[in-house]
Image (cartoon, rainbow, N blue to C red):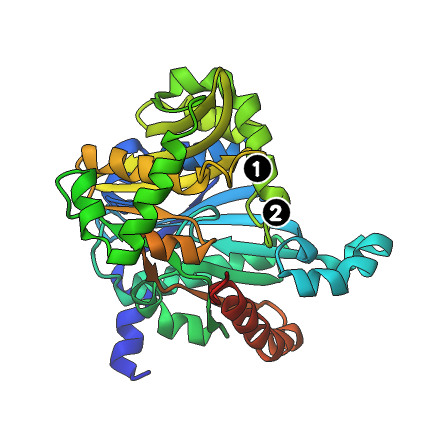
Amino acid sequence: MSAESSAAADPAATGWSVELLDAAEAIPGPVWDALAPADDPMWDRGVFTAMRRARIGPDAYAFLLVRDAGGQPVAMLPLSAVRGLRLDRVVGPAERKLLAPVARVLPGLVSVPMLFCGNFVGQGHVASGGRPLPAPVARLLVDGVMAYARRHRLGTVVFKDFAPDGLAALSPELERAGFFTVASLPDTELPLPYEDFEAYLTALPAKARRNARSKLRKFQAEAELRMEVLEPAGFLPLVPDIMRLYGQVMERADQTLDVLDEAFVRALAEQEGTEQRLVACFEGDQLVGYLHCLFRGDGAVGARIGLDYRLAHRARLYHNLHYAAIELAISRGCRHIRFAQTAYEPKRELGCELVEQSYALTHTGRLPRAVLRRLLPPALEKARAEALAPRS
């Protein structure tokens, strides 16, 4: 780095400052809305408030808030501290099998203290209101992250699921701090330039369109099944059923980094101002499937799904919940809807595009950092290839 660029990156020379806050509620609503991504529902402040009220993995949360020389907030980065991340719950099935004996006898050996930067349950960003990130801000944030990790003895530090352009502005400072990058699982996004659901179906390729109409007919042939769209007040009484169905999905999941609990679902449903609906499938009066949808600006997300596998295949429940969510998003004027980092093949059939994402990782210790740099990239690349591979 040249002397000129080094001086430009020196926060002391520009008057930039950073403060550490311990809750989303400590950031005023207007400041949050001005900085957070305008079309990403997982960055609604209510999501972060619900995370703090729940037990979904992190033991502590914090926020780095950067101000310019005039005291105006210009950037925000959430932090999630996990003091004992169970590696056997976040790796693939082959690695889990290898770790199983160790996890049974010495569970401490598969527990890793880790600091996640970004959004623990969504795509990573440095929230800056869409404005470019000045070099002093990048330095303040990376230095703040590493200071927090060392203070709380969180050896492994991860910028989680950042889009390439999101890491680009941080890249010089991340390299200075010893970070390396590796591709993570891509997100899935469906553009919605359609006037209505029929226009969406018509625009699908021929094979996908035939499959979609077939799946819709199979669902409609199940006389006892019906779809409803519920507001929070309508689905709060269903939370026990929601968790039961969500549990069935998690039992079949390869990775379980961010497993939501009942407290999170209740807290999120109770957030005033958080736009959300439950696409719910009933068999008679019994909830048998759902897709929890959130909205922000012209963006939508199908955040979490639950299925009764007793009838999921017969009624093509997975696809029909997604079709209902797509129709709902179109009716609300959304320009895109995102779904989870799983089941890539059916989501391609829905018309989804893959959104590339990356991890930036380091360790506060030099030797563990060297081990991570050597071992993690091939393991993560293998897991990514397996997740993206076509399946029958």
- Secondary element under disc 2, as helix, strand or loop, is loop
| Horizontal side, residue 160 vs residue 7: left or right | right
Q: Is residue 294 above or below residue 141?
A: above
Residue that lies at the very extreme toward the left in this rendered image: 195
| Horizontal side, residue 230 vs residue 370: left or right | left
Q: At 48% across and 48% down in the image, what residue appears?
A: 120
Ranked by sequence position, the earlier of labels 2 and 1 is 2
Q: Is residue 79 visible?
A: yes
Mark 2 surroundings: few (<14), some (14-19) or many (≥20) residues within 10 A: few
**Residue 309's disc number:** 1
Question: Picture coordinates of residue 220 (x, y %)?
Answer: 36, 30
Residue type (three-letter) at the residue carrying disc 2: Arg
Residue that lies at the very extreme toward the right in this rendered image: 105
Question: Picture coordinates of residue 66 (x, y %)?
Answer: 33, 51
Along the line of sight, which residue is nearer the eye, 210 or 249? 210
Read off the residue under disc 2.
252
**Residue 336's disc number:** none
Q: CA distance from mark 2 to mark 1?
A: 11 Å
User: Badges 2 and 1: C-beta atoms under 8 Å apart?
Assistant: yes
Q: At 37% across and 52% down in the image, what residue appears?
A: 18
Q: Is residue 256 above or below residue 308?
A: below
Which quadrant: the N terminus?
Answer: bottom left
